[in-house]
Amino acid sequence: MRLQRTFTSVLVPALFALGACVPASGDDPGTGGSSGTAGTGSGTAGTGSGTAGISGAAGTSGAAGAGDAGATGSGAAGAGAAGTTGTAGSIATGTAGTGAGTSGTGGGTAGAAAGRGGTGGAAGAAGGRGGSGGATGGARGGTGGGAGSVGAGGTGTVGTGTAGAPGLPGYNPNFKEFYGDDCTVATPANVSVSTLNDLFQNLDGSRMSKKSDWKCRRAELKKIVETYIHGAKPAKPPTVTGTVSSTQIRVHVADGTKMIDFMVSVSLPTGTSGAVPAIIGLGGSSLDAAIVRGEGVATMNFDHQMMASESSRSGLFTTIVGTTGASAQVGWAWGVSRIIDVLVDEKAAGRNNIIDPTAIGVTGCSRNGKGAFTVGAFDERIALGIPQESGTGGVSAFRVVNTAPVGPNGMPAQSLTSAWTEAQGWFGTVFGNYRSNVNVIPGDTHSLVAMYAPRGLLVLDNSRIGELGSTAQHAASAAGGRVYEALGVGKNIEYHGGNTTDPHNHCMFYTSQADPLRRAIRAHLTRKAAPDGRIAPAAVATADLTKWIPWTAPALSDQ
């Protein structure tokens, strides 16, 4: 039974704004004169604000401000002390910036009116996209005492930072498409494993022991997926340029004499200002548009079939890279990465205050859900993936699909042979060598689930439709979730299998999915709430995890 449908309407996403550390300044006292009335000093707080940056560097401290000379007497002007630098929020951890501005030392001396407080420190350099720095540390000086005495300095208030992206400390600090591009990865070899492969076992047979090992272990999983399932995703071409407006993003790609141009439409939410998060929809979206707009998230519509046809694997993608045998899904992933390139570069050039490139989500349903799943797995700049009812060729684990689990409608999961026949472009040509013997693959779709870590992933499923293989989707999500848990970010992944009372309709957004969607958006795109993901399969489609996941996650050190 063919369930996959193409959607050409509605919606999509966006993520996270940034903060830089703010230096502060205050008063130093003037030198006392020989006589006169004690002055009253008031330290004006420094108010510099660092420009948000992607690299996550801390803002530099503000320069000391100079105080004006006292009105009478011979006291010299008090020099305002430089504010201290708040610690920048990490792009990976999203920890709040810390550090109070140094309090100014106030108080005029007798014989001179107290010097006016120094002006604010200069703005900090580009800060991390995490929390904002310490608040201004202004101080009002105390009233001078007798001749030559100094009033007590005021104290600065500690600033509170906005939490940044939930993630792994120190992971992908330079906001790269593929953080593990400098890892040395061996060629994967065939195995003979009927269960879901141990995600923590390296290709050399050793197991991960530190959280920092994840960078290169993820690079191994990517290599496995490319070698056995999808084919390789090409790197960024020499020339990628474009423009960003409130209605569209235009992309120009060139490599020598080969070039392509394409665009994606943009729909901004009302009542917002500045760069907003956005969700890219492959062929549209089946998410609730009112929820997405209400959360202050923009939507973008990407014509992925124009980039690479699922039936022929050809399109704009092959115009640039040639015929490589990669899946159409890899072509879609490559195209979305070029959109993000433009968002990043135009923001750095000061020409994109519309879409926040650090707050991008991707979604799609059915065949487009397969694409959304793969797109988000391959580009580590995507903050949130929302594949909906993706089935075989999407989240559903191959090994579980091959057991033909039956849903409440009496139908089994779509077989690999059926999926391959329906649209070979869902897979790379190389998968033709393994689709009848997936047990030799040293990975499965749970490898793609894990490739999202530590970023956000919300898998929306429909357990009432047997062909979608919800048992296989639950198994893959739960297995990949073990990586999230071991990295200490277990709440960043959510699997929602749906309720028995939900309608049967394919690619219809159900009331029960509203809360999971809001939670994911608020955690990973708008950053208004802490992550609160759950692995929640439907009772009628719950995988036996003891059968499919015989391995346990190691206790990874923070070193």
Image (spheres, rainbow, N blue to C red):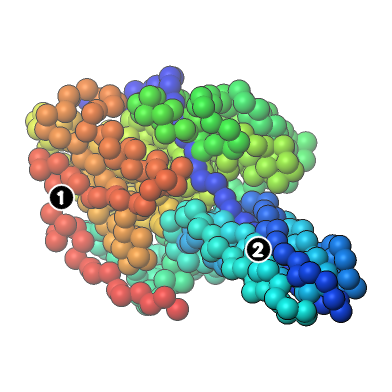
The secondary structure type at the circle numbered 1 is loop
Residue 541 in which image quadrant: top left
Q: Is residue 32 above or below residue 6?
A: below
Residue extending farthest to the right is 74
The furthest residue to the top: 9
Horizontal and vertical percent position of residue 441: 34, 57
Residue 134, position as x, y percentages in the image: 58, 62
Mark 2 residue type:
Arg
Q: Which mark is residue 140?
A: 2
Quadrant in the rendering for residue 338: top right
Mark 2 is surrounded, within 10 Å at the Cα level, by few (under 14), some (14 to 19) or many (20 or more) other residues, namely: many
Q: Identify the residue shown where x is 48% and y is 61%.
A: 95
Label of residue 126 in the image: none
Q: Earlier in the sequence, mark 1 or mark 2?
A: 2
Nearest the eye: 176 or 252:
176
Residue that carries the numbered disc 1 in the rendered image: 543
Q: Position of residue 250 (x, y in %)?
A: 66, 29
Q: Nearer the viewer, mark 1 or mark 2?
A: 2
Q: Amino acid at mark 1?
A: Ala
Residue sitting at x 35%, y 70%: 201
Q: Nearer the viewer, residue 197 or 365?
A: 365
Which part of the image, by quadrant, shows the C terminus? bottom left
Element type at mark 2 = loop
Give the Cα separation between the discs numbered 1 and 2: 65 Å
Query: Splitting the image into 4 quarters, where does residue 43 fall?
Result: bottom right
